[in-house]
Amino acid sequence: MSKYDYVIVGAGLYGVVFAQQAKLKGKTCLVIDKRSHIGGNVYCENIEQINVHKYGAHIFHTNDKEVWNYVNSFVEFNRYTNSPVANFEGELYNLPFNMNTFYQLWGVKTPQEARNKIDEQCMEFADKVPANLEEQALKLVGKDIYYKLIKGYTEKQWGRDAKDLPSFIIKRLPVRFTFDNNYFNDKYQGIPIGGYNVLVERLLDGVELKLNSDFFQNKTEYTKLANKIVYTGMLDEFFDYCYGELEYRSLHFEHQLLNQDNYQGNAVVNYTERNIPYTRIIEHKHFDFGNQEKTVITREYPQEWDKTKEAYYPINNDRNNKLFATYKQLASQQNNVIFGGRLGDYAYYDMDKVIRLAIDRFALEKK
């Protein structure tokens, strides 16, 4: 007899939501994680009473009212609205591209003036079929927006020249002809009061947890413990990379405690010029409207991924998509393993999507 109904590999959002849903139906679960903390990449570290997003900014946003009500049933969310600022050679621009941005770029004051300026800059590319990301961006928004706000940031993010990146990465670019700096269009947005750890801890209430535990070091034993494994790690790793490695981009974070109360006046400032190695600086206290005497900032550096680094962004080109499909076929033959989450699905998911997928996947389980 197995000791648990489920052993869940990974204490990120997919794993802990699945565990909460299973517990609700009287199922027994063991959640394990190789890290020393819960929450996966939404984990926050408390430094000087500031909730520091250790693995990059996480802003919850959704149009899914059920998911919004679900997370709010565990913790109250604040009213934070994501309104990043871009810094290009010392010039500041509002994001996403909106009337504030266009006024800062060109001094235009009406939507029609902004449309005319963009149309004028895009005209020479109108009849071109974009062969790469640079041509696609120039066709969509023209040279000023592209060279100041897209090119350098994108090249840093992907570690490639924009001319060497496929055009599908930016099939569309959101352009708003209103004075609206709200980055997301979603109806619901905010951050858990007290940080994401509060949400994750409450999701895991009453669920057995084991940290600092690498599934692959005791794969046979963990498999024997449960009727089913819920696996949220890298799909290719589960199969020992038998068909080759899927590719990712990774990130490196440098956190700094400063003896001042306000460093940049905004939670997120993007640095869009190529010769600055980091893509953005995050000032965490602004996520919570903090008034602490000190502040913590984080510089975020994109980097090439290897097995020693955390996998953040899947590189969904033709080669990797075909390889993933091969692994997906292999995964479908595993009757007692459920694969899910951003790594299990080799997809970049927003948090609300991960939660929805976990809820829906457990709903498929026979009661």
Image (tube, rainbow, N blue to C red):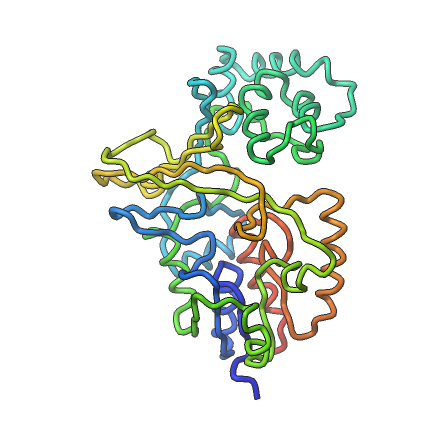
Residue at image coords 73%, 66%: 332
Which residue is situated farthest in the left direction here? 293
Q: Give x and y (percent) for residue 78.
A: 36, 46
Q: Is residue 42 above or below residue 123?
A: below
Q: Give x and y (percent) for residue 285.
A: 31, 41
Q: Give x and y (percent) for residue 36.
A: 41, 61
Q: Give x and y (percent) for residue 194.
A: 32, 52
From the image, which quarter does the C terminus lie in?
bottom right
Q: Quadrant of residue 206?
A: bottom left
| Label tally | 0
Q: Is residue 292 above or below residue 323?
A: above
Q: Quadrant of residue 244?
A: bottom right
Which residue is situated farthest in the bottom direction here? 1
- Seen in the image, is 340 located left or right of residue 46? right
Residue at image coords 57%, 68%: 216
Q: Is residue 176 above or below residue 41?
A: above
From the image, which quarter does the N terminus lie in?
bottom right
Residue at image coords 73%, 17%: 125
- Seen in the image, is 352 located left or right of residue 42? right
